[in-house]
Image: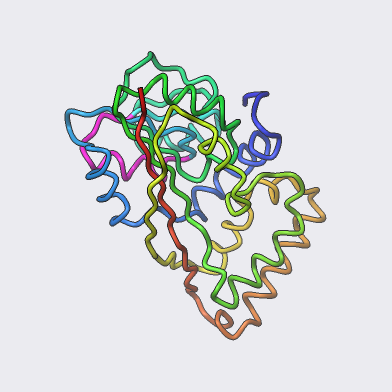
Amino acid sequence: MNSELHEAAAHGFSSAAASYEEGRPTYPSAAGAMLARELHLGPRSAVLDLAAGTGKLTALLVGTGARVVAVEPVAEMRAILEGALPGVRALPGTAEAIPLEAGSVDAVTVGQAFHWFRGDEALEEIHRVLRLGGGLALLWNDRDTTVGWVRRLTELMEPHRGDAPGYRSGAWRAAFERTTLFGPLAYAEYRHVHRMSPEVVLARVASVSFVALLPEPERERLLGEVRELLATDPETRGRSEVELPYRTDVYRTRRGV
């Protein structure tokens, strides 16, 4: 694992890689179709999936026919990606030090990760590896907290965040407001539902970086509170399968000169 990574990302994701793969949703097919259209992805294009994790977004990109390179710093997550997608070239690396040549890709995607980056350095590196006019897309699957039990789940988790950065804070936007390397961000949103057993909901919670970092007694106490929520909330109790709704936020921009 890379010492430049935030501790919650480096240690949390390495210890929770299997839970991440089990508990995290994929991305809506409509979002994948939009990326293919707007980023001009196809058999003649090359795309970098940056901070690819276990390959949730990578798999969607493979379906476009594009030549996909995945860069992921956490070895345990990269190993899962390589096992699931053996045709994808997977490399260790970070957003601030991308192991690719200048102008070598037509598009870059980042799923669930830009808020972890040192934004200014990451944009410089993304600009370097993109061809002129190439596209950058950022995606986040955000739990829909307008649903009662999902809001209560989030209220259980958030007190344990510590200094781990999050998408919802919006702090990641500052690098785009400062840069002249990329154009303005365009936005689109999609809705989808992840259907899973209560045990997979627990894996979803366990996959959160700052939860995986908790001391074992505190982590088990939190998971116990989540079990209690699932067993007692009117929206989830007695169900062998629950629905966890998401809003997928997609931002896209293009490389300037």
Q: Residue at x 64, y 40 (%)?
A: 15
Image side of residue 30 versus residue 154, left or right? left
The verdict on residue 59 being magenta is yes
At a point 80% along the width and 48% down the height, the residue shown is 215
Closer to the camera in the image, 238 or 108: 108
The magenta stretch is: 54-68
Spot occupied by residue 8 in the image (x, y as percentages of width and height): 69, 40
Q: Is residue 65 left or right of residue 31?
A: left
Query: Residue at left 41%, top 47%?
Result: 251
Q: Is residue 145 magenta?
A: no
Q: Is residue 221 visible?
A: yes
Query: Residue 97, position in %: x, y?
Result: 53, 19
Circle count? 0
| Residue 240 % position (x, y) | 50, 76
Q: Position of residue 11 (x, y in %)?
A: 68, 36
Quarter-of-image position of residue 131: top left
Quarter of image, res 56: top left
**Most foreground residue, 155 or 201:** 155
In the depicted structure, whether residue 237 falls above or below residue 68: below
Q: Please, is residue 129 above or below residue 13 in the view?
A: above
Seen in the image, is 245 located left or right of residue 43? right
Q: Residue at x 58, y 57 (%)?
A: 203
